[in-house]
Image (spheres, coloured by chain):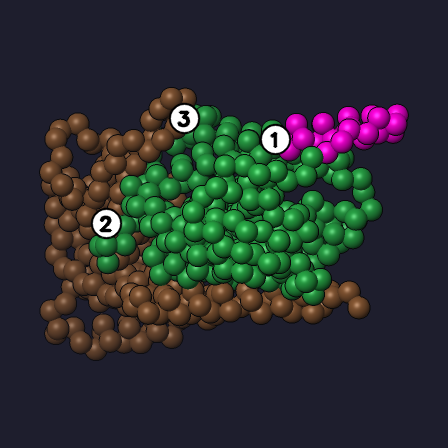
Chain colours: A green, B brown
């Protein structure tokens, strides 16, 4: 009875016009919902999880990445509106970040299309994800383990003092600007540089890049933590939007239908994730997320190293039409 | 499938015996529409010949340039190493015949007309040295694996001595464009008559519109597609915010 119901639900297929693939609507909503739940639970964007999952279900990597940029626009908008209503967005800093980000996105999309022409884009996406997820996963694991120990020590009554932001070489660079909201008077070069690097990654991997911007802005620039998340979401909207448009023009790999279905799932999932996340202890959540990220990295790594079923692959070239 | 059209054709064949045409054929539908729930389709080819003989049908999808990549292990990782580009590769190729090909035509003729997937000739885009035959074989094998190349996509069956029909199968991943179906009449090891018919395969509906704009030749239209994609995302994000806003 239940099985028949599930079969019936799974039978709703949608033909994704750009991915050129027929997939169950329920599966896509489930993927979107699951990743959205995790992103609400852990407070991360989720693009870095969604792209590998899309590749696992058979979406061509180039389409997965470009489509993810499109979905990132939607999730960042709903995120930034929530932060804006709490007045946690530094718009001036956001514009400085995104001036670097848009330029990075241009470079990234150009790189993307060159790699695609040489038939190497899938490989680069895979390797970059293994490195990215591997290093983030390990860092988070180390941090969460330390935090878990700290919690235990705190329970025994020994609280370690924590340092707030300190002045480093970054603050000595020229082109100083005043950011009232963040209470900073710093060189604009650093945020532009961070934006640039994240813009490249955003185009190449389809990620929003909050997991890079947030720590970089806190530790390298010294921005207050409360404002960083909203500001990074604000700039991600623009960079992801520019990336979506550039990918559409240059590589024709944005599947608007896929992005839409995933978004529906993820905004709903994120609500539940956020509510549950607020009730769970943070250290344990971060530990679980680190394990999850590392297992995705290991899965992707295995695909790179394992002997493929087929040594040959075909690629249709547009130029001949 | 459509006995009426068969009858009409029979009538035509009987009414005009003077026209020195050895074979006449038609397709039941010259337009195949790929909708969002397309899962493959058979098309009916039918016709008549003016006496005993064998019939061969060849279906070809629009030709294009294809790159064949070969993976090699490099520092432990499998990467696309060498690649060769081929020109005029039909996106789909299928044969149907009334008897096995080798029984009805000698090898030279099969080669000349490129009948059978083993006899297809593709030109490489650049001059290639010897020893690249494996790429050519891999191209055909990959196409076969994708279900796009086949030696027997259907059987030509006869109704009496002169009427024939065949169902040609189009797989669910059939490429789009203008296909060509060649019909050959064979007698005593020679092709004595031939005819060809176009078959148009196109995506229709919402998905087709998306595909059309996303892959448009005009960069302005692709820009427009990107802008619409962003606007849709902005709108969904905003609606989601309204729906879940904490009051």
Quick one: A83 or B86, which is closer to the camera? A83
C-alpha separation, residue under disc 1 versus residue under disc 3: 24 Å
Residue that mark 1 sits on = A139
Give the residue displayed 71% in from the left and 62% down from the top.
Answer: A86
What main secondary structure does the magenta stretch of the protein show?
Answer: helix
- Dividing the image into 4 quarters, which one contains the N terminus of chain B? bottom left
Question: What secondary structure is found at the residue carrying circle 3?
Answer: strand
Left-right relation of A140 to B133: right
Quick one: A70 or A278, which is closer to the camera? A278
- Dividing the image into 4 quarters, which one contains the C terminus of chain B? bottom right
Give the residue displayed 43% in from the left and 51% down from the top.
Answer: A175
Task: Point out residue A190 in the picture as x, y percentages from the top left corner.
Answer: 47, 45
Mark 1, chain letter? Answer: A
Which residues fall within the magenta stretch?
A140-162
Mark 2, chain letter? Answer: B
10 Å neighbourhood of mark 3: few (<14), some, or many (≥20)? some
Instruction: State whether residue A187 is above or below residue A292.
Output: below
Residue that mark 3 sits on = B77
Instruction: State whether residue A201 is above or below residue A126.
Output: below
Discs 2 and 1 share one subunit: no
C-alpha separation, residue under disc 2 versus residue under disc 1: 46 Å
């Amino acid at each position: 009875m239940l099985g028949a119901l599930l079969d019936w639900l799974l039978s709703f297929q949608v033909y994704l016009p750009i991915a050129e693939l027929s997939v169950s609507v329920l599966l896509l909503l489930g993927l979107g919902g699951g990743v959205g739940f995790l992103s609400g639970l852990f407070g991360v964007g989720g693009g870095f999880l969604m792209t590998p999952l899309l590749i696992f279900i058979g979406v061509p990597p180039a389409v997965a990445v470009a489509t993810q940029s499109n979905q990132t626009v939607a999730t960042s908008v709903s995120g930034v509106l929530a932060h804006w209503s709490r007045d946690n967005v530094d718009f001036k800093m956001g514009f400085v970040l995104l001036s670097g980000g848009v330029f990075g996105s241009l470079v990234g999309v150009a790189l993307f299309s060159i790699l695609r022409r040489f038939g190497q884009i899938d490989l680069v996406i895979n390797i970059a994800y293994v490195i990215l997820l591997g290093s983030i996963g390990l860092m988070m694991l180390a941090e969460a383990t330390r935090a878990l120990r700290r919690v235990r020590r705190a329970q025994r009554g020994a609280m370690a003092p924590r340092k707030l932001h300190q002045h480093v070489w970054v603050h000595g660079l020229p082109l100083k600007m005043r950011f009232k909201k963040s209470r900073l008077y710093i060189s604009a070069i650093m945020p532009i540089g961070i934006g640039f690097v994240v813009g490249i990654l955003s185009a190449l991997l389809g990620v929003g890049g909050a997991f890079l911007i947030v720590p970089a802005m806190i530790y390298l620039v010294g921005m207050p933590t409360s404002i960083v998340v909203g500001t990074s979401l604000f700039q991600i909207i623009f960079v992801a939007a520019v990336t979506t448009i550039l990918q559409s023009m240059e590589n024709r790999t944005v599947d608007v239908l896929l992005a839409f279905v995933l978004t529906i799932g993820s905004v709903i999932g994120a609500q539940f994730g956020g509510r549950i996340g607020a009730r769970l202890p943070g250290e344990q959540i971060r530990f679980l997320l680190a394990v999850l990220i590392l297992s995705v990295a290991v899965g992707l790594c295995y695909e790179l190293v394992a002997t493929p079923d087929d040594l040959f692959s075909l690629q249709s070239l547009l130029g001949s039409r | 499938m459509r006995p009426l059209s068969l009858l009409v054709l029979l009538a035509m064949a009987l009414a005009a015996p003077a026209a020195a045409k050895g074979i006449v054929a038609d397709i039941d539908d010259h337009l195949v529409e790929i909708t969002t729930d397309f899962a493959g389709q058979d098309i009916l080819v039918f016709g008549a010949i003016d006496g005993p003989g064998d019939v061969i049908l060849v279906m070809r999808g629009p030709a294009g340039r294809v790159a064949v990549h070969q993976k090699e292990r490099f520092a432990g990782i499998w990467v696309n190493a060498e690649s060769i580009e081929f020109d005029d590769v039909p996106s789909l190729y299928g044969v149907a015949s009334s008897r096995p090909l080798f029984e009805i035509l000698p090898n030279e003729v099969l080669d000349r007309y490129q009948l059978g997937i083993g006899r297809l000739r593709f030109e490489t885009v650049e001059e290639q040295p010897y020893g690249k035959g494996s790429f050519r074989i891999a191209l055909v094998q990959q196409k076969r694996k994708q279900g796009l190349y086949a030696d027997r996509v259907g059987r030509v069956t006869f109704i009496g001595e002169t009427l024939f029909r065949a169902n040609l199968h189009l797989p669910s991943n059939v490429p789009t464009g203008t296909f060509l179906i060649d019909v050959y009449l064979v007698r005593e090891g020679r092709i004595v008559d031939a005819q060809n018919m176009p078959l148009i395969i196109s995506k229709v509906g919402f998905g087709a519109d998306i595909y059309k704009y996303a892959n448009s030749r005009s960069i302005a239209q692709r820009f427009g597609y990107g802008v619409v994609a962003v606007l849709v995302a902005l709108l969904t994000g905003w609606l989601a915010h309204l729906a879940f806003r904490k009051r």
